[in-house]
Amino acid sequence: MSGSSLSFVLVLLLSCLSESSAIIRKFHDVACRAHHIQSLMQFKNEFDSSSCNQTDYFNGVRCDNMTGEVTALQLPRGCLRGTMQPNSSLFRLLHLRYLNLSNNNFGSSTIPSELGNLNRLETLILSSNGFIDLSHNDLTGGFSLAQNLTKLNLLDLSYNHLSSTIMNPKSSIFTLHDLHYLNLCYNNFVSSTIPPEFGNLNRLEALSLFSTGLIGHVPSSFSNLSLLTTLLLGHNDLTSIFLPAQNLTKIPSQSHKQLEGQILEPISKLITLTTLDLSFLNLGYPIDLRVFSSFKSLAILALSGNSISPTSLSSDSGIPLSMEALLLSQCNISEFPNILKPLKNLRSLDISSNRIKGKIPEWFWSHPRLISANFFNNSLNGFQGLPEVLVNSSLRFLDLSLNCFEGAPPNLPPFIVSFTARGNRFTGNIPLSTCNHNSLTLDLASNNFTGAVPPCLSNLTAVNLRKNNLEGSLPDMFHDGSPLESFDVGYNQLTGKLPKSLINCSSLRLLNVEHNGIKDAFPFWLKALPNLQVLTLRSNKFYGPIATHDDRGAFPELRIFEISDNNFSGSLPPNYFVNWKASSLQMNEDGSIYMDHKEESIKNTYYIYADLVDLQYKGLSLEQVKVLTFYSAIDLSGNRFEGQIPESVGLLKTLIALNFSNNAFTGHIPSSLANVEALESLDLSRNQLSGTIPNELKTLSFLACINVSHNQLQGEIPQGTQITGQPASSFEGNARLCGLPLEGSCTGPRVASIQYVKEDKKEGEMVSWEAVTIGYALGLLFGVAIYQVIASYKPEWLVKIIGPYYCKSC
């Protein structure tokens, strides 16, 4: 999948079979036996279940209308956290036929073999549970888990940490002869080969081994899988799938042409396949698309990440006309593939991140069923035909980002729901015709548009016009009931004030007006927006206080609060952050507690719009895609704030980055910051802080960057790995501060730590930490790539970096 913020993927069948592969069952309210209800409650109480209420929990329960036995259980996403024990009450529900525990955190424990007691199970979904293996010989012995589940027809163990032991030929998983669907994708079978015993599962209709670290060849026993319609082998190091040209040198010349690039057995015998994923196989030779001509039923083909033979991209290659989705991203393609012309059933195309130049041919838009097209990151520069060439297209999702398009953007198809063209050279005014498309996601960032922001964008779902040359005031255009969720006009030349009609956008989650010339007081009225999660006002001319003395109503859903480099002033009351609930709750590893990316689905096609936030900090411009799914940050730097830093900042459990630098804060560094266990970056430099650095800060195990330079701090620097490993410049400018990493040692007794909390108590404003109950256990945040730059005034924050969008050399 491309790095574009508008990405096209084929859900289930192209990235991995998922829990939704199962028949979606609607759970009805029927009478369940009392002792079963008791068992269900006991099962819930075996875990930390504070993140789901009882109503949600029982919505996933289905009981037999006649007997009252529990026959189906589907837990809500993220409901349970803890270790599943062998004596769990779950194993008393002996009549279960459907069990879905996916997306709950069972803490890297093993899958209990006692699940085998549920011998009526037909569907078992344990995806994204954090399991590391299966207990009792890791699914390789004679225990009851697999042996007793003789009725199982769907097994999903995807997105766990299962090891290569499951690939043992003696694994009892290969005794599940009634399996129709088996999903093992995204596990850790590193350097394992595919056991020939898979051929025993001859009723399989769908098999996913996607991204599991497998090596070697596909065993000949796969030819037994005559019912197989979906096979996902992508993102592995498998060989012997295609016959490379270098292996044909000893074959007589008359046979050479027939065999070149031929798919080898057993895959060549799976002629019933409708979906085949062979992406990113790391082959050392190009794939000839003509070898797929014998797969007459093939509808979805994913070959991304492999080199494609240029001659096979012509219109006479014989690719199956039944093709509905073709993924050829990162295939080193240099010309627009004419192979697409006869594919009248084509619904989705991804040829992103190739080297395609020139214009998109006019015939492409005439495909009658075309829904999505992804041209991200090529060198395309225009469209053949008239400006209205797209108007009659059935297209709904179009990504032209990171190409070389110039002039006015195309007139859009009538049913389009998302159009992204960031990083091109489009010019002129934003077309007013875009306003005719209700609920459109429009991304025209990083172009050369001029003029004013159109006064009609409030009908759209998401608007990204950042990094253009727009000017004038933002129009007061936002009507009541507007569907707008994301509005980004950063990095333009806008002036005036924020339009108060934004208050009508009750669905608004992101508002970004950074780097403009807007002059206004702090928009307290935005607190009325119930879903606002990102507010970025950086580098404008905002002024005045951001809080009243008794402020308790500040943005309960806010996670990113970026108001640096303005003229804000005043002090923050001690309880300022008390009601910032979203930053106080625990996030799931996938960030689902926060701003889920927007998904639109049409049959098998998913379209994802990932919000993007610019995290520019003093000279380094960074853009973070999907920052909204896991990032929590506050930046008040470069203003004129004074007074003490609120103790309530310690309530923000999920905060990753905190920047109060370049202000006039006084008093002591709050010891409550030690409660912000996820904190990775702390910048309090260039203030007037006094006292000692709280010793408690050395317990922040994720703290990779701290800067308290140029204050009035004193005493010994806490001697913890996360702190003493910082550069000396992070502590300079404090005349009475001593200890590593500064040169020299503290010669006198350490200055006693001053308890700022006690001072608050005298004023009757102390925040009672014991009284504040956070219902979510704080966990580790994974997947954050750390980038640290030490600047002259303050270090850059730690962010996951994605390069800025640009137009490549055309």
Image (tube, helix red, strand yellow):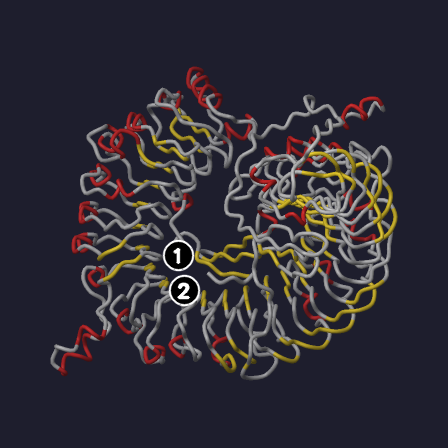
Task: State whether residue 477 is above or below residue 676.
Answer: below
Asked whether 707 or 154 is in front, the reply is 707
Q: Amino acid at mark 1?
A: Leu
- Labelled disc at residue 14: 1
User: On the rendered structure, is 278 left or right of 494?
Assistant: left
Is the Cβ of the residue at disc 1 closer than 8 Å to that at disc 2?
yes
Q: Give the residue at mark 2.
A: 325
Measuring from the top left, give residue 189's x and y in whole percent: 30, 46
Which residue type carries mark 2? Ala
Is residue 724 placed above or below 72 in the rendered structure? Answer: below
Q: Is disc 2 placed on a helix, strand or loop? A: strand
Residue drawn 55% across and 25% down? 54
* Occupied quadrant, residue 462: bottom right
Q: Quadrant of residue 721?
A: top right
Q: CA distance from mark 1 to mark 2?
A: 10 Å
* 1 or 2: tag closer to the N-terminus: 1
Which residue is at the front of the view, 152 or 352?
352
Q: Residues within 10 Å of mark 2 (few under 14, many from 20)?
A: many
457 relative position to 100: left or right: right
Q: Which percent across, then down, holds residue 647? A: 74, 32
- Count the marks: how many? 2
Observer able to see residue 585: no
Q: Nearer the viewer, mark 1 or mark 2?
A: 1
